Image (tube, helix red, strand yellow):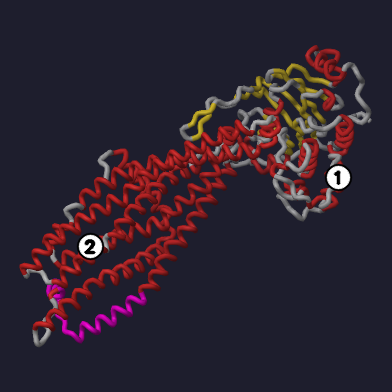
Amino acid sequence: MSSDPKTRQALSQDSKRIWGLIRPHRRSYLLGFGSLAFSNFTSVLAPLFLAVSIDLAQANATQTAAENPTVFRAIGLHIDQFTLLSAIAVFLALHLASGLFQYQMIMRFAVPSHEIGQTLRNSLVERLLALSQPFYDRAKTGDLMSRVTTDVNAARMLLGPGVMVGLDTFLMMNLVVAMLMALSWKLTLVAIIPLPLIGVITNRLSHAEYGRFHSVQRDIAALTERVRASFVGMRIIQGYAREDFDRARFRDHSQTHLEKNLDLAKVKALFEPTLDLMLGASTILIIIFGGFQVVEGTLSLGTFVAFLFLITFLSGPMIGLGWAISLMQRGRASLHRIDELLEQPVEIEDPAEPISSEGPGTLVIRGLTFDYPVPLEVGAEAVVGRAHTLHDVELTVPAGETLGIVGPVGSGKSTLASLIVRLYDPPPGCIFVDGVDVREMSLGALRSRVGLAPQETFLFSDTIQHNLGLANQGDANTNVDDIRRFARLAELDDEVEALEAGYQTILGERGITLSGGQRQRLAIARAIAADPDILILDDCLSAVDAKTEVAILSNLREVFEGRTGIIISHRVAAVRSCDRIAVLEHGTRVGLGSHEELLATNDFYATIARQQLGGEEPEDGGLDHGA
């Protein structure tokens, strides 16, 4: 054991963590330990009975009556032949029963370890679902997947086979040493001379393995992320003929992973030969000193043979010791990575005493200033956050009004939408829904009242119907007529019905089966299906052709009837028929009014409109609330 205080403290904390996981299952572990103890005890009895047989045979060959076997005299027992034969019969029965206890032992350790693994996975997923958008801005998908799968499995191996083999090694070594001491304490002292070296070597190798395994786990996460990025971006890779570049980059990652694994394997490979060397040294010492004692008559042949057999019983525990230490170091490293994720703070959560917001859906924004946090950090990796900000934004959207928000790319439009639904946390006292600060509302209540169709459309690899009904708790049995009505409002129904499986069509990963415009329209239909009091469409028409855009905007008049609506776009055509339009530039509101008012009074908006519309009048069918 290292004398380093930090190492001792880390081991102490790890022990408490492991015990905390085992404690709810301690009954199963105790029963497993009992089965293990019985199995080991019957195993170490075998050499003793072998020694008895040898001594008894030797005594019968030279005497008219057998004397008490030397091996039993050595441990203070006196036994006759009848008792010996009876004991052998009992031993055989116990040996048969030992198989049942071995089964119990394995199951008593395996079942709780799998249950603990499931608990860890569930806890990780629960934590990931609770973590907010800022965390996912800096986290890597491959790393998260590695923690939920590979690290949980390594922790399970520690708490199952690791604990079982560790206890087996500890118990067997103590039983064997106790038996050896009972047979001949002098020869035992000679045999254990090499053992202190095992502790020193094991300590050094285990520390080396811990660091290397931690590095391998990080590299697995990076490799997983590299593969994921390649698969997701395959269209881009093939579209730009970058296969050779991506192949070379993957080979570099793979080579690094191989080198780290080989480095780890070298350390692991040293365990078994080192332990075998120490065990071989003990055996040689026993043969030399024990042989002299047999020749001198101070040690019986049976006892000497039993001694050699018992020493060989240490080979299994020695190998098990190396494997148990390997599992322990791997499990410790993985538990640290798991705990690092479980201990991530929930940056956006429900208030202690949430306030309910009731009303028609009035949205008020007062003096909103927001900066993305810089720097961001995941574990030991620092990541620089985005620099987009909002400065002193003031807006009031009365219930039933439709507000357009327009501005160039990077002006803060999507940031504003994310703050309204608290994907990022706004400063207190800045955003209100029907007079209640959004920070004082529960997240569930807020997001049920304010629906957001985000700029980046994400669809699950499931049926179109499931994706459309996702806002209603993903109910696969959502009324088909309603589903079709929402799709018609987004000008999507005819195209879905044209598919062979219709609304039961399974989408490819991230909705790749559909075109960009179809994915955007499905996202609009999904947001409408949520039936919120305030509906925000964040640049959801950018991939839609002009004719379809006009039709959707016309349909939205029905959607926004009696509902507060916000349409965000960098295109004036998408917002020009809104009741009012807010103009953003560099995170600041630089204009507010109707399309006509802004054309007359706001040079920035007029310039954008002139560049995009070329002085043309809007086509009929927009969001004309005056009609």
Residue 82 in the image, given as x and y percentages of width and height: 20, 87
Q: Which residues are magenta?
A: 71-97
Residue 232 in the image, given as x and y percentages of width and height: 65, 38
Q: Amino acid at mark 1?
A: Asp
Q: Which residue matches tag 1?
A: 493
Q: Which residue matches tag 2?
A: 311
Quadrant for residue 398, please give it: top right
Residue at point 26% right, 69% down? 44
In front of the other: label 1 or label 2?
2
Classify mark 2: helix, strand or loop. Answer: helix
Relative to residue 334, is residue 248 depicted above or below? above
Residue at point 31% right, 79% down? 92
Residue 54 in the image, given as x and y percentages of width and height: 18, 76
Mark 1 crowd level (few <14, some 14–19, many ≥20, 10 Å Cα): many
Q: Which residue reaches farthest left?
A: 296
Rendered-image quadrant of the C terminus: top right
Residue at point 29% right, 56% down? 318
Classify mark 1: helix, strand or loop. Answer: helix
Q: Amino acid at mark 2?
A: Ile
First in sequence, mark 1 or 2: give its number.
2
Rendered-image quadrant of the N terminus: top left
